[in-house]
Amino acid sequence: MKNNKVALVTGGTGGIGSAICERLYKDGFTLVANYRDFDKAMKWREEAKKWREDQLKMGIDVKIIEGDISDFKSAQRMITEIEAEIGTIQVLINNAGITRDTPLYKMSPDQWYDVINTNLNSVFICSRLVIEGMIAKGWGRIVSISSVNGQKGQFGQTNYATAKAGMVGFTKSLALETAKKGITVNTVSPGYIGTSMVMAIREDIRNKIIEQVPMGRLGKPSEIADAIGYLVSESASYITGSDISVNGGLYMSR
Ligand code: CAA
């Protein structure tokens, strides 16, 4: 059954993003998926349109909107447009993320800043832009997709692990600020999920990683989406400042 709440999923047309959109749509939210026009080429726009059509064929109606969530002005334009045309965003899923894996001794400033801007500064930007609307409504949910590698570290990921660990401190602090305002703020930390991001790891390295997963397999995007579906539901209204690990046992934190 439809509820009257708007949910924005950043990077919503990607591997995990698509599964989150599908799950939240089925749970009754009005869904908006953000994508980024990386190089101002039509390619990304065309791909996003095609993605929307494919979702519609499966009975999932997700609006798509372009915006660079690592840039305050671009994100502000996007969020203003969503709120004017569709409604106040009451669920924000900070899902957009990239990797630029390389050992620190070879890492360029661009490889550092691209990851920190897209994966971490975007969390500040999007949360900042929706928080006042959520406070005014007296109900909100923010879930940021962190990572097992923000918890345990990973060879070649000083940039990525920093961004993913940073989200956790942000989440706990914002959870304190909003605890009395009907807003919960949490993270989900996926392990290795079968998406193009993980499939881009060199095959022999990827196979070694999978061998280390106690469940012996990659996770499914739907297994992340299910945790998010729960966190944004009324059933999870007493959970804030928490992290849920969904990693097949790869790392167990308290
Ligand atoms: N631990 C220790 N040593 C390692 C290592 C590891 N995990 N991985 C590589 N090495 C060693 C190699 O054995 C090699 O040693 P020798 O020089 O003695 O032969 C050396 O490091 C290779 O160093 P290079 O500088 O040549 O590294 P590279 O440029 O060839 O490769 C890398 C570096 C691209 C980061 C590669 O190691 C890699 O792909 N690692 C996996 C990174 C990873 O897991 N990324 C996750 C992406 S998905 C994601 O991030 C989603 C999520 O949230 C989980």
Image (cartoon, rainbow, N blue to C red):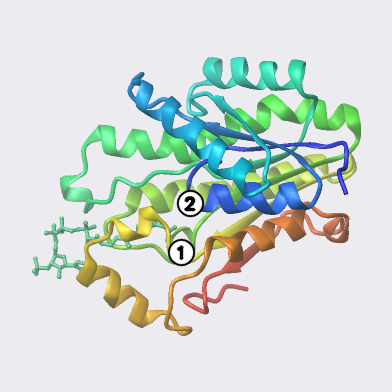
Picture quarter with the C terminus: bottom right
Q: Amino acid at mark 2?
A: Gly
Query: Residue drawn 21% across and 37% down?
Result: 108
x then y, percent, for residue 18:
56, 48
The answer to which of marks 2 and 1 sits earlier in the sequence is 2
> In which of the image's four quarters is ligand 1 placed?
bottom left
Q: Is mark 1 within 8 Å of ligand 1?
A: yes
| Contact between labelled residues 1 and 2, with CB atoms less than 8 Å apart | yes
Q: Which residue is mark 2?
A: 15
Q: Is 100 rendered above or below residue 209?
A: above
Residue at the (28%, 75%) spot, across then down: 207
Which amino acid type is shown beneath numbered disc 1?
A: Ile
Q: Which mark is residue 193?
A: 1
The tally of labels here is 2
State the residue lying farthest toward the left: 106
* SS under mark 2: helix
State the separation of the CA atoms marked 2 and 1.
Answer: 9 Å
Q: Is residue 213 left or right of residue 20?
A: left
**Location of residue 135 in the rendering, given as x and y in whole percent from the top left corner:** 85, 31
Query: Under 8 Å from ligand 1: the CB of mark 2?
Result: no
- Assess disc 1: are there few (<14), some (14-19) or many (≥20) residues with their C-alpha within 10 Å of its C-alpha: many
